[in-house]
Image (cartoon, grey):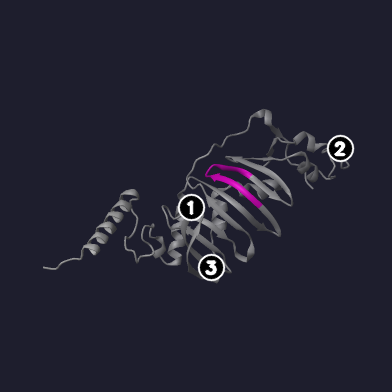
Amino acid sequence: MTVIPQGRFRRAVLAGALCAAAVVAGAGLTGCSADDPDAGTNGVGKLPADGIQSRTRAAADSADAVRLSGNVVSNGRTYWLDMRLKSDGGSGSVTSQGVTFGLLRVGRQLYLKADAEFWDRVDGGGDGKDGGDGKDAGAGGKLDGKYVKVPQGDPAYKRFSGFTDKRTLLDGLLTLHGTLAKDGRHEQSGVRTIRITGGKGTGGALDVSLEGTAYPLRLQRAGGAGTLSFSRWGEDFALAEPDKSETVDYGKQLPTS
């Protein structure tokens, strides 16, 4: 008969109890070996890099909502975003060139909300005075703090509606360029992650959660084109048309610079 030393026996019992507790607390957790770096994770770290990308893209697509924050460089201009998105619209704020404005899209209707300074800048004169034909004089005062309907034919609609479109925005952002590879295990806001890169980092880097659902948590875009964080996956939020008293319909086209 083999005799197991008492100390080893106690450690084995303790390890078994901890493993059982992990299984009860989080069904589907993978592995219980102290030597397994994926112990207690969702197991996505064991996949090849392209498998991780496929898994996290599927998770992002299936989530009902997400918060996205950080900066994006597009056409030489930097945009600072703080947006909450879901399938039928989104809301939040965008800052560019020192000016902040709010965006709200409900269905196909997009609204832009900004202060008088913003509207005076795009009004043509920068001081709210008549730019020549009298049409847009004093637009800043009229539109200050209001939700302004953005006509779908206006250039601003195409430029800004993408910031409120969950599928379009994530499809563009979560694509890494070049050969995919794993770049070790990391941590984002206390959550363990597996990092994948494209083109040895030149094509971007993406941190994917190793806990719970394999959601993307942080993206470093290729070519220094911005860094974004993702959070509140699946958390619903209110999204409704603003009250008519807060809304201005400017017509077929907004003031332009």
Q: Which mark is residue 251?
A: none
Q: Position of residue 239 (x, y in %)?
A: 56, 37
Distance of label 3 from label 2 (alpha carbons): 53 Å
Magenta residues span 80-92
**Cβ atoms at labels 1 and 2 below 8 Å apart:** no
Amino acid identity at mark 3: Gly
Find disc 2 in the rendering and name its residue: 134
Give SS at disc 1. Answer: helix
Give SS at disc 3. Answer: strand
Q: Residues within 10 Å of mark 1 (few under 14, many from 20)?
A: many
Q: What is the quadrant of residue 43 in the picture?
A: bottom left
Residue toward you, 61 or 231 = 231
Find disc 3 in the rendering and name its residue: 198
Find disc 1 in the rendering and name its residue: 60
Give SS at disc 2. Answer: loop
Residue 89 is covered by the magenta coloring: yes
Amino acid identity at mark 2: Gly
Residue toward you, 55 or 153 = 55
Q: Residue furthest right?
A: 132
**Magenta span: chief secondary structure:** strand
Residue at x 42% of width, y 55% of height = 211
Q: Earlier in the sequence, mark 3 or mark 2?
A: 2
Q: With respect to residue 154, does 73 lie above or below? A: below
Amino acid identity at mark 1: Ala
Residue at x 57% of width, y 52% of height = 169
Side of 137 relative to 43 (left or right): right
Q: Position of residue 128 (x, y in %)?
A: 84, 40
**Cβ atoms at labels 3 and 2 below 8 Å apart:** no
Q: What is the quadrant of residue 2 in the picture?
A: bottom left
Residue at x 79% of width, y 38% of height = 140
Q: With respect to residue 232, does 188 lie above or below? A: below
Residue 14 is covered by the magenta coloring: no
